Image (cartoon, rainbow, N blue to C red):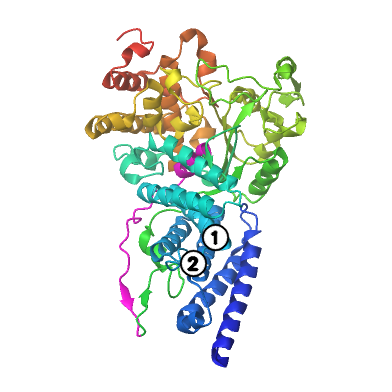
Amino acid sequence: MSENNDVTLQTFRALVENADHKFARVRDVPAYGRVSQSHFFHKVFKAYTRLWKYQQENRSKLVQCGLKRWEIGEIASRIGQLYFSQYMRTSDIRFLVEAYVFYEAILSRRYFEGSEGSPRDLGVRSKELRFYARFLLVSIILSRSKMVNHLMDRFVALVDDCRSNFRETNFKEWKQVVQEIVRFTKVDKGFNIRPLRYCTTFDTHRSSLPYVARFHAKRVLKFQDALLASYHRNEVKFAELTLDTYRMIQCLEWEPSGLFYQKPTVKASENGDSIDHSGASGIISMNLAADMTDPSMPSNPRKATLYHPSVTHLIAVMATVCEELPTDSVVLLYISASGKSGHSNVSPTGNSGGSSKYSRYKGIYQDLGTSETQNNGKRELSSYDDYLWFFSRILSGSNNLYPGDLIPFTRKPLFLIIDSDNSHAFKVLHGAERGETAALFLSPLRPIFKNPSEVHSHTGSQFTFFLTAPLSAFCQMIGVSPNEADADFYNEAENILANAFSEWEIILCSSTSMDLVWAQIITDPFIRRLILRFIFCRSLLSFFCPPEESEQYMPLCLPQLPPSVSPKAEAVRSVVTQLAMHFDVTDSFHFTDI
């Protein structure tokens, strides 16, 4: 090895160490809050830019010194991780696209596969496994179904190969990852018809746009922050992304218009090596992501996503979000969790939810009830209210989220969505706020299906499904798979719903009786779409569930929306009738005059 090459290798190793050190600092930065962490990001971004350029300019010397292809792949993988972490902190879709570009480049150039016949190293194979898991997560969030299927095949084959070649190593965790991804994609694939993200083609209604534009409230709030948390036992998930949270993340983002980009041409360098001037080669920049996204598209609301948080962690994050909430803004808090004794709301109608080792406490839970007192006309909640239960090995009040725990956050405008078998316990928040009247969506206490035995008990929450994919949720409820219907038939159903949403937008924006709580947030497209889907869900369930059991199958909305969009209002009821007739399932509904 020449002295010059030795210096080159030492410089490269120093750059790697420096970049990895800065990467570790960014990785430890909390993924929530609006306090700017851009200086950390720019430092590590600059370090990896310098490292990537250096290895590219000195590739031949480094190879002579023993540089392996997997080391280049590891650098690119770190950059992909960096971009993905920034997406999770900012909800900026450009970072997610950049992560995809880097991972796709690693896959296409086969950085981790090495040369044929080379000895296999367990450490390298572990890096390759982590790469596939991370690329799968990015592809799922970007809704790249073809790439997800391709990666799944490669990932499963790699895990099997590792088990064969490294018999002394336990790959139990990786087998569990395989099971998670197979389960996740199987559930999501069955009803993945249209983008869950806000798509102007499908979700903007021309006839109602003038009414929305002219709508004026005394106060208008911006929707820029959301906190999403899910905590069910045995829920469908991949990594730390649960199915319910995944659907809500997608529902609160704009659909990028330029994701189907043309890859830049690959040119040959003087030494014969190919140089790809995409984001994964050459100077790392945001230019490629800018080409793939619409610059005129508004920014996504910033979302803090918590996987199986403790109650104290949830409260701490919510406090940070509220403390940093911009003036005249509303924060959306979405919680999907079981209540009381921990029976999950994902069990279909007809199932008891199974036995619980804590069932002996059931009577105690029921006896607690909800108590309240009056103090100068304001409702006061006691410390023994019903609650959501964040599972733990031991039964403890520290794992319970009580309605009263959320009262301090009502000093700021709050839109609360509770999806639980004990969600109605949180209606006591209405009237007990400490500054701003909260907007509440509370799920039904139980889901309901035409054929409960045909619905897997772990397909995600039905209420969340209605808020994120209403027609797919309708099809699941009546036992029809959208994939079995032809495209024209399903598009006709989508048009029925789209026309209804347009009409309801006009009704809402023309109403003189809308509560200010809704009036001040209805101009936001994401929240308005949630309101429209709630109206549909509530009316649909009111006609589908047995009348004598309607209380447990109906969602609640507080304050009340205008009577003109109530479940029995003609403009709403007629849509349910149309869809039932379109799918020929009117006999499953409790209509009295069809």
Above or below residue 567? Residue 520 is below
Q: In which quadrant of the rendered image does the C terminus lie?
A: top left
Q: Which residue is mark 1?
A: 127
At 58% from the left and 66% from the top, the residue drawn is 41
Q: Residues within 10 Å of mark 1 (few under 14, many from 20)?
A: some
Mark 1 vs 2: CB contact within 8 A? yes
Q: Which residues are magenta?
A: 243-270
Q: Nearer the viewer, residue 514 or 141?
A: 141
Residue 528 seen in the figure: yes
Give percent across and percent down for residue 209. 34, 41
The residue pinned by badge 2 equals 73
Q: Secondary structure at mark 1?
A: helix
The reply, left or right, for residue 521 in relation to residue 495 is right
Q: Residue at x 36, y 60 (%)?
A: 292
Q: Is residue 232 above or below residue 450?
A: below
Residue type highlighted by circle 2: Gly
- Percent position (x, y) of residue 288? 39, 66
Q: Which of the two labelled residues, at mark 1 and mark 2, occupies the earlier sequence position?
A: 2
